[in-house]
Each structure stands twice: as C-alpha cells, then as structure tokens.
Amino acid sequence: NAGVTQTPKFQVLKTGQSMTLQCAQDMNHEYMSWYRQDPGMGLRLIHYSVGAGITDQGEVPNGYNVSRSTTEDFPLRLLSAAPSQTSVYFCASSSGPRVGNQPQHFGDGTRLSIL
Amino acid sequence: GNSVTQMEGPVTLSEEAFLTINCTYTATGYPSLFWYVQYPGEGLQLLLKATKADDKGSNKGFEATYRKETTSFHLEKGSVQVSDSAVYFCALRSQGAQKLVFGQGTRLTINP
C-alpha cells in the first residue's frame, strides 16, 4: 500500500542546474498537487492537476514546470535552479470532487538544497 | 482571498497538560476545515476534519469544532503526550475546490 511516493528524498544542486522531482500515486486519484514548505510560511501551492492532461498554476509557480501524462505520475521540473528554491517539496493527491470531500494524501517530501 | 491564521509557535508544554492551538480563517461560503500533523522527517498526515458549521472533528484524543460565527477551528487535547510533539497545520478547502490553503504551522514540543 504505497500511497504517494516521492523521489529523491534529498538532493543538492548547483545554481543553474536542472532536475525533476518525481511523484507517483497508486490510488487512482484524479487530483495531484505540489507544495513547497518554508519555515514560518506553511505550505504553498506550486502547481496542481485535476486529471491527466490538465495542469494549472498555484500560488508560487514561477521557476517550476509540471506535466500530467498519466493519472499516476506528476513530476515537477526545475529548469534552472536558484537558491530561492531551496525548500522541502511535498506532493499530494486526492480523489476528485465527484467522490466528495476526500482529504489529500501527502508524500514524505523531497528536501532540496540549491548552492 | 482565502487565508488561514494559526497561533505563533513554538509551543512547549509538559506531559499531561491541556493543549489549545488557535486557528482562524477567512473564506467565502462554507469551506471544509482540516488539521494536519507532521512528525519529524515525515510528510503531512490528516489528523481531523470538519465539513460544515458546528461539526466536531476528533481523532487520537484531539478535537476541533467548526465555528462559523467566529470563523475558527481551534485544536484541543485534554492531556498531551511526548509522542504528540510535531508540527500542526490548520487548512481550509473552499466549496467545490480541491486546493488546500494552509496556515503557517505551529511546532509543538511536549516535555516529559
């Protein structure tokens, strides 16, 4: 019963490098989202998707890209990493509104440091 | 826009003390309200929820009541344990939406 799986758990990058944070869920959830967690600021929504082929911007989308080619996967791409993107990143999923008010399930997070 | 405000942390209590973590919100309509807990090194877990006014969510000895008149959803526990040490997040979800809006989190430390 994997739930939401994020990889890697830790990553150190140099400024300007690119990378992709992976997120996969095995619950057939329609809704997936990416948050970043910074001290004293709670979790802020980066991008979200209401289903395969559909993505939209959240509160802090700049510097990040997403795609949703399958129901299971929702990768987050940093095209040119900046120190301001040092954070802990969480992926979450939930069943869609057609099945009611279901809570979101979170992955264990990816701790990313940009030097 | 929608927002959630939690009491500033960190909060430090002794074991068996009474806990209250305040949470107030701003939203149109009738949002759903949640408390999530994050233990060290882990992701967020749903602790409890309430979906309409006067609903009381409860789990693991924690309780919170959805108060529409005061736009609040305060978290309470009558007797805390060392194992309750974690960061607690209050969150809301607007009607018909899936996006969550989080408060800034409150770090709770329980000393034996």
Image: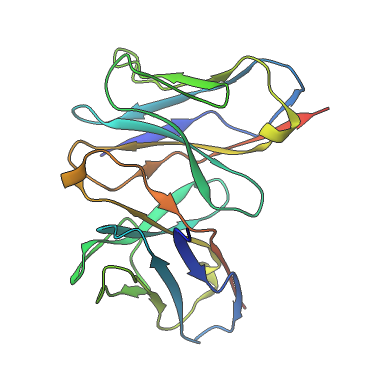
Point 35% across, 31% down: residue: B33
**In the foreground, A40 or B48:** B48
Point 20% across, 44% down: residue: A99
Provide residue A112's location: percent of width, then percent of height: 57, 70
- Residue extending farthest to the front is A1
Provide residue B49's location: percent of width, then percent of height: 39, 30
State left or right for residue A23 relative to residue B55. right
Image height of A82 relative to B11, above or below: below
Point 26% across, 38% down: residue: A101
Provide residue B47's location: percent of width, then percent of height: 49, 34
**In the foreground, A49 or A59:** A49
State left or right for residue A41 relative to residue A66. right
Residue B30 picture quarter: top left
Image height of B60 relative to A47, above or below: above
Q: Is residue B22 visible?
A: yes
Provide residue B54's location: percent of width, then percent of height: 32, 13
- Residue extending farthest to the bottom is A17
Q: Is residue B75 visible?
A: no
Coloring scheme used: rainbow
Point 44% across, 60% down: residue: A4
Query: In which quadrant of the rendered image does the C terminus of chain A lie?
Result: bottom right
